[in-house]
Amino acid sequence: MKDLRGIYTALLTPFDDKGRINEKELSRLVKHNLDLGADGFYVCGSTGEALMLNVNERKQIMKIVKENAENANLIAHIGSISERDAHELAAYAKALDYDLISSVAPFYYKFSFPEIRDYYIRLAENSGMKMLVYHIPVFSGVGMGFDELSSFLKDDRFAGLKFTSNDFFTMERCKAQFPDKIILNGYDEMILSGLSMGADGGIGSTYNFMADKFVLLRRLFSEGKVEEAAKVQSEVNRIIAVLIKIGVMQAEKEIMNQLGFDFGHCLPPFKKVTEEGKKMIAEEVIPFIRKAKA
């Protein structure tokens, strides 16, 4: 299998004023992130509002990204509360020659772990693709410790984990026991912690507009320049702290708008960014972000 370590942008989805996918701006976003040095893309994840989209819209996004991603690594998030939809999306990812599929654990109905494990196995087996388990307990409500996660990591059908949790003890144990499996850190504000515990890179939403900072942070860490990497993490976290005050996903789209993209707004029921929030972004974020090439 090709080297799938690195920095992956969890792509935002730009919408027009009627809530339709803005294909032109999505293509621009992909190219901008390639310019910033991103190694690949996590497509149709939480950041992309994918769980609020229908299957055809998610396929549309997957196709646009594939057409513009050049040789970048591609991971398709195909998770859905409808397993039938997940299978359809997995088949489409394979047809587009994506590198991996990924899925959040089935949620809402409080499924047992055997039910969750069988869901993942069916998707991996039926698609014929390697699966990256998306571990995000704060959103899915599905908590998995080392025993549960290792049951996937010991299985050849699973490439590894997208680990969006601050349980770095479990992350370290997973990487120590399964060093050949890929573990990608999920919390942007803690990527240095994740790298120190064995993560092979990261998947993040703020990468959309500052992937270059995460590429630099990872390189500095790999060179043993931990203090310099920590300074980059601090710079990133100062920006993230502003987003938290506004609403992270809404603020991320407003940042893209202020950088010259036409991203519109998050879908309802997300609220729009206030004028105060826009001013905060203009003063406290934009001056520290590299703009897209004309």
Image (cartoon, rainbow, N blue to C red):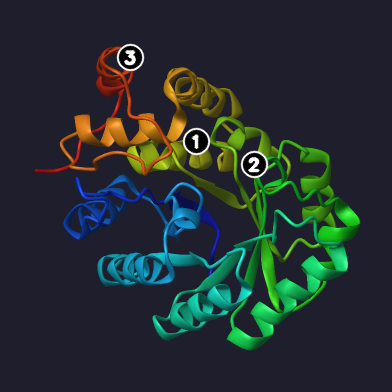
| 3 and 1 marks in contact (CB < 8 Å) | no
Res 223 visible = yes
| 1 and 2 marks in contact (CB < 8 Å) | yes
Residue 8: x %, y % from top left:
46, 53
Name the amino acid, label 3.
Glu
How many other residues sit within 10 Å of disc 3, few (<14), some (14-19) or many (≥20)? some
Which label belongs to residue 195?
A: 2
Which label belongs to residue 217?
A: 1
Residue 287: x %, y % from top left:
25, 19
Residue 13: x %, y % from top left:
34, 51
Mark whose residue sits in front, 3 or 1: 3
Name the amino acid, label 1.
Leu
Vertical comparison of 91 with 79: above or below: below
Dot 2 falls on a residue whose secondary structure is helix
Mark whose residue sits in front, 3 or 2: 3
Q: Residue at x 35, y 41 (%)?
A: 266
Residue 264: x %, y % from top left:
24, 40
Dot 3 falls on a residue whose secondary structure is helix
Vertical comparison of 220 with 66: above or below: above
Q: Tell me which corner region of the image, top left, top right, bottom left or bottom right, holds residue 153.
A: bottom right
> Which of the marked residues, 1 or 2, is nearer the chain's N terminus?
2
Name the amino acid, label 2.
Leu
Q: Residue at x 21, y 55 (%)?
A: 22
Outermost residue to the left: 294
Which label belongs to residue 284?
A: 3
